[in-house]
Amino acid sequence: MAIKIKKIERKKMPFLERIYIFYIIAGMARTFKHFIRNLLNTKNIEFLEYPEQKPEDISPRYRGIHRLTKYDNGELKCVACDMCATACPAKCIFIEACEVPNSKEKAPKVFNIDLLECVFCGLCVEACPKDAIRMDSGIFTKVEGSRDSFISDINELSSRKRGEF
């Protein structure tokens, strides 16, 4: 038995719509209108005096800067399994493991995250089997003077608290 294929007829766009000239001109006209309006009346321009004023409309679902969680006794939950570093598409997580005396598990000796390379996708959080890494610090930006200060080490990551701003 043969299957009949019905061809969908599409409406052909006129030439002027296909080259998008009208839409490009309309977009540029709107941009120019806003430019002139702001140039002539600078008192109505909305701006934020950061860092003195913090933005109020940050979504509660926003992924902040990473933090490492701890047990109640103060030990890190991280067992240096390297799952977060493996899941990271930017390859910005570096972990070096060491053995813990009188335990079967490992612990991270070195845990670095390069925040300049990180894309803040949250895959490291999803991959962690111990729920040791989270992105709920509430810190939405980090301002520093050098590139080296954007590498978060194990001490900095473990000292962050949830929701600190």
Image (cartoon, helix red, strand yellow):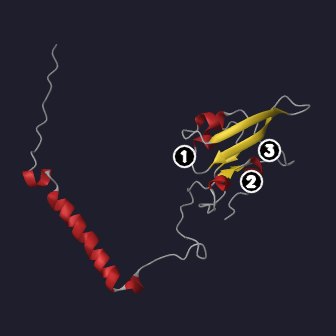
On the question of residue 132 being in view, the answer is: no
Residue 144 location, x and y as percent?
Answer: 63, 62
Categorize mark 2 by other alpha carbons within 10 Å: few (<14), some (14-19), many (20+): some
Residue 112 is left or right of residue 98, and the answer is left
Question: Which residue lies at the image location 56% right of the left edge and 47% below the top edge?
Answer: 117
Closest to the observer, 60 or 127: 127
- C-alpha separation, residue under disc 1 versus residue under disc 2: 20 Å
Pick whichever of labels 3 and 1 is earlier in the sequence: 3
Pick whichever of labels 3 and 2 is earlier in the sequence: 3
- C-alpha separation, residue under disc 3 versus residue under disc 1: 23 Å
- C-alpha separation, residue under disc 3 versus residue under disc 2: 13 Å
Q: Which mark is residue 121?
A: 1
Q: Would you say the residues marked 1 and 2 are in contact, meaning their CB atoms lie under 8 Å apart?
A: no
Categorize mark 1 by other alpha carbons within 10 Å: few (<14), some (14-19), many (20+): few
Pick whichever of labels 1 and 2 is earlier in the sequence: 1
Q: Quadrant of the C terminus?
A: bottom right
Q: Mark 3 points at which residue?
A: 76
